[in-house]
Amino acid sequence: MMARIFLALSGLIWFPYGLYLFFQPTYLADAAGIISTTATGHIELRAMYGGLQAGIGGLAFAGALRPALTRQVLFAGCFLFGGLAVTRLLAALGAGEFSPYTMFGLCFEWGSTLLALWLLRATPASPAA
């Protein structure tokens, strides 16, 4: 049950944020210093920050609403959240810069990774798995 609550909360964070960034990609200019200077750049921001994050939220909702998918979604979350956490940390260390946006991302992504991993280990596999 805790795993499904975690996934529902994750969906409530990722999905609307992704939709918001799809429709308002310029938000990232002030929040994170990310701007696009071409139509291709604008498309990329909408796809990677809007579509991908909304997709992560949709996946989290699927795991929350369909118990048969909970473990698989937690497993995927370990890689998705973990990939973001590791690369953000390495990039911040390499740049020597930890802005408030970066720190929030690190806390959220590492926290989500560790919680997903813990819940994955604590959630029994279904008999059909």
Image (cartoon, rainbow, N blue to C red):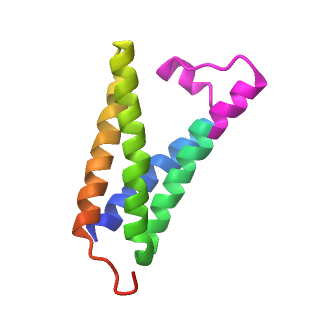
Residue 31 sits inside the magenta stretch: yes
Q: Is residue 19 above or below residue 2?
A: above
Residue 112 image offset from top left, x and y in percent = 32, 48
Residue 103 image offset from top left, x and y in percent = 32, 26
* Residue drawn at x 29%, y 35% as measured from the top left: 107
Residue 55 image offset from top left, x and y in percent = 56, 52
Residue 61 appears anywhere in the view: yes
* Residue drawn at x 42%, y 67% as measured from the top left: 72
Quarter of the image for the N terminus: give it: bottom left
* Residue drawn at x 52%, y 18% as measured from the top left: 30
Image side of residue 36 versus residue 31, left or right: right
In the foreground, 12 or 57: 57
Q: Which residues are magenta?
A: 23-47
Residue 46 sits inside the magenta stretch: yes
Q: Main secondary structure of the magenta part?
A: helix
| Residue sitting farthest toward the bottom | 127
Q: Is residue 119 above or below residue 105?
A: below
Image side of residue 67 versus residue 43, left or right: left
Residue 13 image offset from top left, x and y in percent = 43, 48
Image side of residue 110 versus residue 36, left or right: left
Quarter of the image for the C terminus: give it: bottom left
| Residue sitting farthest toward the top | 96
In the foreground, 79 or 57: 79
